[in-house]
Every structure is written in C-alpha cells, then in structure tokens.
Amino acid sequence: MKLALANYRNEFEHFTLVFDLVRHSLRELGDAGFRRFMESARRPKEARLAKIITFINTQQPDLTDIVAGLQQRHRKEMSAKLPVTRSLKWAEYRGHAFLGLNGSELILRVARFEAFLKEIHMHALFGKPQLLSLCKPNRPIALKDIFRGGFERFKMSEIDRQVREADRLSVKEKAKFFARRLKLRWGADSDVARISELVELRHSLVHQIPTAFVSDKSISDARRLLLSVPQECFKQAAKIYPSHFKQ
C-alpha cells in the first residue's frame, strides 16, 4: 500500500484548528465563565470538607469545637487559590493555561512528526529492499532466521529493526541518515538545528521539566518545520520510490 501525505497534512491542520479553538476560547472567557469554572473547581473540596464535618459531628462529638476553625481555613484557602471574583489569580491561571497549551501542542506535533518519519523510512525500504544491505552489511544472520518463517517475513522483520534503530538516532544524525542512505534531504542545516531544539524541548517537557517554557515562537516554528520537512522528504521519496508513495 502506498503512503499518502494527505493523512499527515490533515492531522497537522486538525491539530492547528483544535489548539487555536482552545486558545480563542481561553482569550474570550469572561468573568461569568471564569466564575463558573472556579465554583466548579471548588465543589469537590467543599464536598470533602462537608464529609469531614459530618464525621466529626456524628462520630467525634468531642471535637466539634474545631469545626469552625476548619471552615475558616477552608474559606481562606478557597479565596486564595480559587477566587470567584476577578483577581490576579485569574490572570495567573490564564497565563499558565496558555503555557500548558503550548507545551501540549509541541508534544503532540513532535510525536506525530517522528511517527511519520518512521512511515517514510519504512515505505522507502519497501520500495527498495536493497537498502537493507547498507546498514551493518557484515552483521551475521543465521540461515534459520531467513527460512524459518519465509523470506518475506524475514524481510519485514529487518525493515522493522532498521526503522526502530534509525528512530533512536538524534535529530541531526537522523537527518544525515535520511540524506545519505535514503537520499531524502530534510532541508537547510538551520532547519535541522531548529527541529533538534524543538525535539529537545519536547523531551524536557515529557521526561524532565513538565512546566518548561514553550514560547509562541517555538509553536510557530514547529507548525512550519514539522510540516515542511516531511513534505519535502515525501516529495523526493515519491520520485525515488514511486511504487510506495502516493503523489
């Protein structure tokens, strides 16, 4: 089956629409909407406090004198953390929400970008299996591995293994691999370097610092480069491996 670029492009545009819609909704969120959200966020905490008070009143009557203190501390905590009237806290939460959206968008876009590169690599190997011999050509292979399940099954396992190995390369090494082995150039070195920075930022978000700052410029660059690079690779692949890439 031929690989189509349209699916990736449609998913990319869908991500843009969804995240832009959420950002628009956040910008347009008025006082009434914000107040309803804060009231909703308060309800589980208020229900929990009510259960504690009920337990004290019914099971620990000798502790009823602390109920008033619990209620007072709860009111102060809610006013500080979940105010129902406009405050600096609202602006703070709105800002954090925008930053969280940027981080989430970057994570999704990089994940889909990496997955599509694997699909391109796999279909290039389908189109020209001879490429399999260029990666570790002297690697010993037992005859039983070739004939036990049939040659086609062996070929598929080799394609899967080489795609997974390439996927573990750094961004810059992967770009070199695509250019040298598959004859698919990603573009300018500056573009590859910027993609490397974006992937490292995604890695930091997922594995190290979930609150790492993701700027609007990073999102703009991700939207541009994580679409243009696969498109360029695909256009070249359709010429070199026409049997497995749909124009």
Image (cartoon, helix red, strand yellow):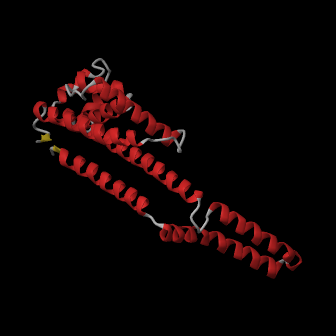
Task: Point out residue 1 in the picture as x, y percentages from the top left corner.
Answer: 15, 45
- Which image quarter holds the C terminus? top left
Q: Nearer the viewer, residue 112 or 169?
A: 112
Residue depicted at x 41% and y 45%: 107
Residue depicted at x 74% and y 73%: 52
Q: Is residue 23 above or below residue 8?
A: below
Number of numbered markers: 0
Q: Nearer the viewer, residue 67 or 112?
A: 67
Q: Is residue 18 above or below residue 35?
A: above
Residue depicted at x 33% and y 30%: 166
Q: Is residue 142 visible?
A: no
Q: Nearer the viewer, residue 221 or 28?
A: 28
**Which residue in the rendered view is the most extreme toward the top?**
138
For residue 27, side relative to residue 191 (left or right): right
Q: Is residue 188 above or below residue 243?
A: above
For residue 220, side relative to residue 74 (left or right): left
Residue depicted at x 89% and y 77%: 62
Q: Is residue 224 visible?
A: yes
Task: Point out residue 218 in the picture as x, y percentages from the top left corner.
Answer: 39, 39
